[in-house]
Amino acid sequence: MAYRAFYLLVSSIVVLSAIVASDAAGSVGINYGRVADNLPSPEKVVGLLKSQGINKVKLYDISAAVLTALADSGISVVVALPNELLAATAADQSAADRWVQSNIAKFYPRTKIEAIAVGNEVFVDPKNTTEYLVPAMKNIHASLVKSKLDSAIKISSPIAFSALQNSYPSSAGSFKQELVEPVIKPMLDFLKETGSYLMVNAYPFFAYSANSYQISLDYALFKDNPGVVDSGNGLKYHSLFEAQIDAVFAAMSAIKYDDVKVVVTETGWPSMGDENEIGASEINAASYNGNLVKKVLSGSGTPLRPRDPLNVYLFALFNENQKPGPTSERNYGLFYPNEQKVYSIPLTQEELKGGQSTPVNTNANKVPVTGEVSKTQAGQTWCVANGKADEKKLQDALDYACGEGGADCNAIQPGAACYNPNSLEAHASYAFNNYYQKKTRAAGTCEFGGAAYVVSQRPAYGNCEFPTGGH
């Protein structure tokens, strides 16, 4: 996931995610990023993938250590040719031949390489590598033909959702005009000729975070909601994800490429973010990813293509501590580097059939408040103050909660049971949670303009324990 300059595009994006494969149901894979200095060895990672039933993984480069560890594992792999190699690969067929021999033929078939992502989000690459993309794809394919691997290994390139000029309503989806003739059409022609598919990276989180007053959180998280009717085609959408996917289909249809399939190669939701990254929380990440996996494994498609199962790769396997950018960039992982889950969601058909449909956090080390945290209770949630918010924002939100909001703040008055610890963050957390519980934990009642967020372990300040919350 390249650090994104934010792809909001009118309020819709394409998205998808996953963690297991099933031809009848659609497939779920996961992105294995390694921009971190504390990750387990590739051998341990393969063991983790297998223990979780994950049999599709996508890499962002070529690593001999990783590909060797994946040998004979049965896990299908998408590898990548980095953007910095596009120019050389496009200009020199022999360079492409050497790359394929050293990085593909050397490991296949023991390592089950199923596709090569040539570049990543090339259209937003600040080094302006767009012109090299299709020639590089063609040269890599020619190298696969020489090695007789072209029938087994597909070639594509993940595009950012910002390649769309319009995405709302979905039926009006269109690509940016300046990209259509120079690169979109030639790339789609190549994908058709080689029987490949378009890779798309999509994040509804960005649209929601920037427009939380207009976009329903339930709509963004695949929860029950009234739905949104597309004024152009009359179809009703119950998730931002599906609306975004169909915007891509509409964009392809507008230039007469209805027969190219789409795979969502990145999607996800951060479990933590900066104060302006509204909606970034463990409970929301668990809801989004868990409900998305459930959608994918159900086998249903989008309103525009209901019979086409969805194929997605969730971002990401681990939290990566060296990724640049906002806090969210380092907190998309399903797992911590110590291989413990950031939160629990069903990842396989077996788990879904077993009834594990409610995301449950399994860790007690993420609550950003003072005091001990009690044992996690499945399905229960609380609202706490965002300690990174500035004091004025916290104070204004506290005043609102205790005043117009109607929260019972008697317990945090001087001398009362929950006055200590006497800090703005502690008092705000108590007030926010009281408000949140009184509002029956309804969507949007733990926002306070970014001054609060939901957690799934009960916080405690000194001897003052928060009331129980739950679904």
Image: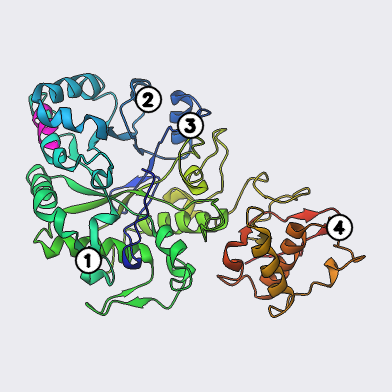
- Is there any visible trace of residue 221 in the rendered image? no
| Viewer-closest of 21 and 257 | 257
Mark 3 sits on what residue? 36
* Number of marks in the rendered image: 4
What crowding class fits label 3: few (fewer than 14 Cα within 10 Å), some (14-19), or many (20 or more)? some
Q: CA distance from mark 1 to mark 2?
A: 38 Å
Mark 2 sits on what residue? 66
Q: CA distance from mark 3 to mark 2?
A: 15 Å
The picture places residue 231, in percent across and down from the top left corner, at 26, 80
Q: Earlier in the sequence, mark 1 or mark 4?
A: 1
Q: Amino acid at mark 3?
A: Ala
What's the mark number on residue 173?
Answer: 1
> Residue 296: which quarter of the image?
bottom left
> Residue 291: which quarter of the image?
bottom left
Q: Amino acid at mark 4?
A: Asn
Q: Disc 1 or disc 2, which is closer to the eye? A: 1
| Viewer-closest of 261 and 296 | 261
Q: Disc 3 or disc 2, which is closer to the eye? A: 3
Q: Disc 1 or disc 4, which is closer to the eye? A: 4
Q: Earlier in the sequence, mark 2 or mark 4?
A: 2
As for residue 6 lying within the magenta part, the answer is no
Above or below, 169 relative to 15: below
Q: Secondary structure at mark 4?
A: loop
Pointer 3 with pointer 2, Cβ within 8 A = no
Q: Amino acid at mark 1?
A: Gly
Q: CA distance from mark 3 to mark 1?
A: 36 Å
